Image (spheres, grey):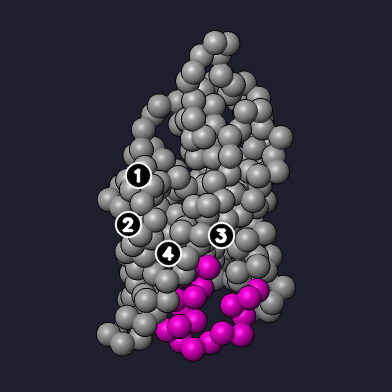
Amino acid sequence: MSNGDIFVGEVIGTAILILFGAGVCAAVTLRHSKARNSGWAVIAFGWGFGVLAGAYTAAPLSGGHLNPAVTLGIAVDTGEWGKVWVYVLGQLVGAMTGAVLCYLAYFAQFRANVRAPGSTEGTADGPVGTLGVFATVPEIRHPVANLVTEIIATVGLVLPVLAFGLTEGLGESGTLVLIVSLLVVGIGLSLGGPTGYAVNPARDLGPRIVHTFLPIPNKGGSDWGYAWIPVAGPLIGGALAGLLRNAAF
């Protein structure tokens, strides 16, 4: 695969992933959405379907990594580092693009998502604040615990992804992406409670950058003090998964 194909594939695939993922967060949390308050399971499946659509779309061009932690895990496992930067750049640009598309799709809802006169409702991640649509926000802010959660959850993603590659016939049958999508749903349901399961540095960093600059009324802060955790945790987890895969299989 050429650098150009990889870049284009990762931009398109990651943009679709974030459009679906941020989109389901917007659908569930924004005040004037028909899907408001439909629950965590809906969010988990929305992200899983985002992986399904994005990875299948990107696969012919780039293999559909869509995640720097996956790219890092593969590089650590195989020792092939030459194209890592192309993947990561495409993933970051795609994540930012997907976040902008989500904003445009829910433009009217973002404009209407304001605090009622005289109300004290809403925090940085509440009914008025919109950061949770774009990036992860921990339920309990504890940097060490949050970092450990992201590391564990990312190992739970990347190690199976690497192991699936050893299963003869999964790739040829076209079901590998489907299995990974279900894995993402499972991680969301099982391990997403503490931090919102970034498990993908581009998924969190790109939309957080976009949130900083979007003209959303009463959007709240972008919480840059926390932003290093959903970047560092998944990268550490991806590297550990690559080491485990290389050592054990």
The secondary element bearing badge 4 is classed as: helix
Residue appearing at x 62%, y 40% in the figure: 102
What residue is shown with label 1? 140
Discs 2, 1 touching: Cβ within 8 Å: yes
Real-space Cα distance between discs 2 and 1?
9 Å
Q: Mark 4 or mark 1: which is in front?
A: 1
Give the extent of the magenta segment.
68-86
Q: Quadrant of the C terminus?
A: bottom left
Q: Is residue 69 magenta?
A: yes
Q: Quadrant of the N terminus?
A: bottom right
> Of the residues tagged 1 and 3, which is closer to the observer?
1
Q: CA distance from mark 3 to mark 4?
A: 12 Å
- For the point 42% across and 71% down, the residue is 236
**Amino acid on which disc 3 is placed:** Ala
* Earlier sequence position, callout 4 versus callout 1: 1
Residue bearing the label numbered 2: 145
Are the residues at dot 1 and dot 3 in contact (C-beta closer than 8 Å)? no
Tag shown at residue 39: none
147 or 167: nearer the eye? 147
> Of the residues under marks 2 and 1, which one precedes in the sequence?
1
Query: Local crowd at mark 3 within 10 Å, few (<14), some, or many (≥20)?
Result: many
Residue type pointed to by label 1 = Ile
Please tell me the numbered disc located at residue 202: 3
Residue 55 lies left or right of residue 152; in this view the side is: right
In this view, which residue lies farthest toward the top? 118
Residue 233 marker:
4
Cα separation, mark 1 vs mark 3, equals 22 Å
Q: Position of residue 204 (x, y in %)?
A: 53, 53
Q: What secondary structure is marked by label 3?
A: helix
Q: Are marks 2 and 3 in contact (CB under 8 Å)?
A: no
Structural crowding at the residue carrying mark 4, measured as other residues with C-alpha within 10 Å and reported as few (<14), some (14–19) or many (≥20): many
Magenta: main secondary structure: helix
